[in-house]
Image (cartoon, grey):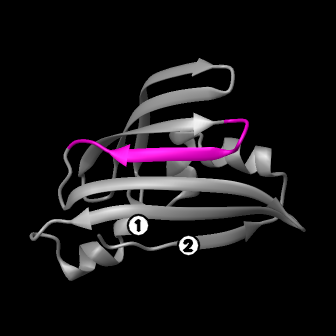
Amino acid sequence: MPRAEQSIIISGDPDQIFAITNDIERWPDLFVEYRHARVLTSHRSERFAKLEFELGNAEGQTWCSWRILDYQERIAIAQRETPMFPFRYMHLTWLYKPVEGGGEDDMDPGLRDGPECSRHQRAGADTDT
């Protein structure tokens, strides 16, 4: 399985960073690759939340994903649902850790592109949740 890991240090409170970057409806303002984002369902019970949402890009493509949030440990686990194209599967884990000067945001995308996936699509694959 192709695997990539990324990490970034963000100056600020890790809890606030976790909240902002998991505010799905805010994603078009935060990330250039999303033109629209809509939460379809949201369930929260103290420590955990599960979100199901729809995202869309500039080309008019839309897809649905889900995300489970652990507010205590600052972990987000996500999976793309439908349509999967251009991937066979896409699983993401985001870890938010306090470090000196802010919070470290680690992304571990587990994704598998389908045979139809072009080189251009693979280059941007880690941005679609």
Furthest-right residue in view? 100
Q: Which mark is residue 94?
A: none
Residue named by callout 1: 126
Cα separation, mark 2 vs mark 1, equals 10 Å
Q: Residue at position x 69%, y 45% from top?
A: 74
Position of residue 8 in the picture relative to residue 128 (left or right):
right
Quarter of the figure that contains the N terminus: bottom left
Seen at 56% across and 52% down, the residue is 29
Residue kind at label 2, given as amino acid type: Gln
Q: Position of residue 7 (x, y in %)?
A: 62, 71
Q: Residue at x 61, y 28 (%)?
A: 48
Relative vertical location of residue 7 with respect to residue 21 in this rendering, above or below: below
Mark nearer the viewer, 2 or 1: 2
Q: Label 1 crowding class (10 Å Cα cut-off): few <14, some 14-19, many 20+?
A: some
* 2 and 1 marks in contact (CB < 8 Å): yes
SS class, disc 1: helix
Helix, strand or loop for disc 2: strand
Magenta span: 71-82
Residue type beneath disc 1: Asp
Query: Residue 63's x, y, as percent?
Result: 27, 44
